[in-house]
Image (tube, coloured by chain):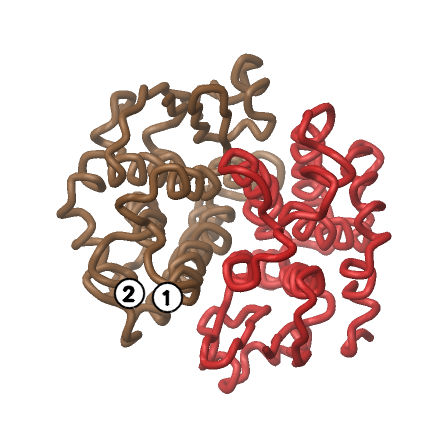
Chain colours: A red, B brown
Amino acid sequence: MELYNYFRSSASFRVRIALAIKGLAYDYLPVHLLKNEQLAPAYADMNPARLVPLLKDGDQVLTQSLAIIEYLEETHPRPPLLPGDAAARARIRALALDIACEIHPLNNLRVLRYLVHDMGLADEQKNRWYQHWAESGLEVVERQLAGHPATGRFCHGDTPTLADVVLVPQIFNAQRMNCRLDHVPTVMRVFDECMKLDAFAGTQPSACPDAS
Amino acid sequence: MELYNYFRSSASFRVRIALAIKGLAYDYLPVHLLKNEQLAPAYADMNPARLVPLLKDGDQVLTQSLAIIEYLEETHPRPPLLPGDAAARARIRALALDIACEIHPLNNLRVLRYLVHDMGLADEQKNRWYQHWAESGLEVVERQLAGHPATGRFCHGDTPTLADVVLVPQIFNAQRMNCRLDHVPTVMRVFDECMKLDAFAGTQPSACPDAS
């Protein structure tokens, strides 16, 4: 498999973690977002959305990190990232979507660029925007985790699931943007547990070949 | 089952379509977003994200529209919203996420409110923001659909899938906000096909009990 990705992209980081948990080898192909390599014709032809990550598995060209991870789950079920019955899987997916649909889309690079370059916002307003969605969105995740009987060592139970795969890159982003995190103690406890595992620590941005 | 939802919420509309395709009966429980009923304690206790939709299935409380639809797909597999092999399912999910993660989160009510009330944007700037993400995001969907061998009468093949379930509510939003749509002819052809079906036409906002 070949993974087109960028060390600091949190959607890329999700897929790196999932591949690592499932023990799958891949070629790491960097696409430098700040240099706009995602807009180059060779890449844009493969991915009209001009976003990373993109996974090639033989002839298959796969986009959208959550769709890629569901594909990996179906083609390489062990160890499972969506364990349990339909209700358990729904809780895990909802936690992942609380981040992937409610926080991350508001804070990704092209949106921040649009706020500054097209809407004329100052950097300080842009940072406030970022922190607002990250801090309020993670507070929602905290309320779903704290005290819920299914929360364990990780977001759901005692093995890492899709929810953790999506949570950890979001915390990296929040820390880089100096977001408040002292209001989400359960989230941070789970984050610390994840970072004890090679699948998370070994795929973090600073460990990537294109890290700068 | 009980569906807490709002006639004009496109995430709610997705779940209504999915329930209708699968032929599942439910009680329609309106949560009026403009009246902030989603912030009322009784609702917020069930759903810390204070978003619609929410589906109750017996004791299960399910949130996040895509997680709800995956749950319905697992518990009521026929007719399938994710037909085919893993690669086909990945394409369908990626199309759905191209809308659910790249367009809709930027344009939902709480984000538009934040732009106006917290960042001080004029209504006209807010509308430009809306149109930018809807028009450019649907152009991405168009490029994924047009000329792709798996595109059929619907986004993927000749039966409606998760991709159509997510696409149709987004088109309703785009039309309501006067977005350009003449640049996405394949998208609009699929939309017209969907609207010939009761599962889509019968669950559209104007057909809901809380429509106003």
- Left or right: residue A82 compared with residue B151: right
Instruction: Residue B64: give x, y in percent of width and height.
Output: 49, 37
Q: Quadrant of the C terminus of chain B?
A: top left
Q: Amino acid at mark 2?
A: Val
Q: Which residue is mark 2?
A: B184
Rendered residue at 29%/45% (across/down): B172
Q: Which residue is mark 1?
A: B139
Q: Amino acid at mark 1?
A: Glu
Rendered residue at 21%/29% (across/down): B207
Tell me the element at label 2.
Answer: loop
Same-chain status of marks 1 and 2: yes
Viewer can see residue A15 = yes
- Left or right: residue A200 compared with residue B6: right
- Left or right: residue B199 compared with residue A129: left
Q: Is residue A180 above or below residue B29?
A: below
Tell me, yes or no, whether the two marked residues, 1 and 2, touch with CB atoms within 8 Å.
yes
Give the letter of the chain under mark 1: B
